[in-house]
Image: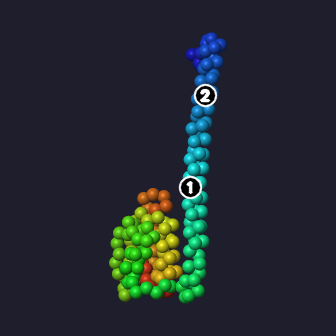
């Protein structure tokens, strides 16, 4: 027996209840298929905007220091070895748990392996090393990490200008 015949055999009150139930199921399906995902996207977007606003506020706060460092010649002088400098600044940047291996590379270089590092934090840290301490990236291999936004990186860092290709 087809659906139309089945509906025709129902009493008008029962038929109206079936129509009402179908309408409620349809509304629920639309709600869970469209409205709920949009709410989640909205919340994630708001959190991202809030984080970016906090980043902007921090950048505006440290801008005078960066400008002063640039005016005074760029790299801050430090008596720390490259290994100690990289370890200290990496931990300060929040990359301490991501460092898996460090080994010297010549007289003024360092090879470094990071796993599961936040990409944005890694790039900001490398920029800080270059701008404040004159540490340059000689070579870098960066691969996707275990989750979105995380990377695995092999870096070769050195004091001074980058080597000519």
Res. 47 mark = 1
Q: Percent from the top left, x then y, of residue 76?
A: 49, 84
- Residue 23 visible within the image: yes
Quarter location, residue 95: bottom left
Whether 10 is drawn above or below 103: the answer is above
Q: Percent from the top left, x then y, of residue 20?
A: 62, 23
Callout 2 crowding tier (Cα within 10 Å): few <14, some 14–19, many ≥20: few
Q: Percent from the top left, x then y, of residue 100?
A: 35, 69
Give me the residue at 41% from left, 71% from top. 91
Quarter location, residue 63: bottom right
The residue that label 2 is drawn on is 24
Q: Percent from the top left, x then y, of residue 160?
A: 47, 87
What's the colour scheme? rainbow
Quadrant including the N terminus: top right
**CA separation in Å, label 1 and label 2:** 33 Å
- Residue 114 visible within the image: no
Q: Foreground residue, 113 or 91?
A: 91
Q: Foreground residue, 141 or 54?
A: 54
Whether 35 is drawn above or below 165: the answer is above
Q: Foreground residue, 15 or 91?
A: 91
Q: Secondary structure at mark 1?
A: helix
For the residues carrying marks 1 and 2, which lies nearer the camera in this image?
A: 1
Q: Earlier in the sequence, mark 1 or mark 2?
A: 2
Give me the residue at 57% from left, 44% from top. 37
């Amino acid at each position: 027996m087809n659906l139309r015949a089945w509906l025709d055999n129902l009493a008008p009150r029962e038929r109206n209840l079936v129509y009402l139930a179908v309408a409620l199921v349809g509304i629920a399906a639309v709600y869970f298929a469209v409205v709920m995902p949009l709410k989640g996207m909205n919340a994630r977007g708001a959190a991202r905007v809030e984080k970016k606003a906090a980043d902007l506020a921090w950048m505006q706060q440290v801008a005078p220091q960066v400008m002063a460092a640039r005016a005074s010649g760029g790299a801050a002088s430090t008596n720390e070895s490259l290994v100690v400098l990289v370890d200290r600044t990496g931990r300060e940047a929040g990359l301490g748990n991501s460092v898996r291996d460090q080994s010297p590379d010549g007289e003024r270089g360092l090879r470094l392996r990071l796993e599961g590092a936040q990409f944005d934090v890694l790039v900001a840290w490398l920029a800080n090393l270059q701008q404040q301490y004159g540490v340059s990236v000689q070579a870098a291999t960066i691969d996707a990490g275990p989750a979105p936004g995380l990377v695995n990186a092999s870096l070769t860092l050195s004091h001074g200008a980058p080597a000519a290709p």
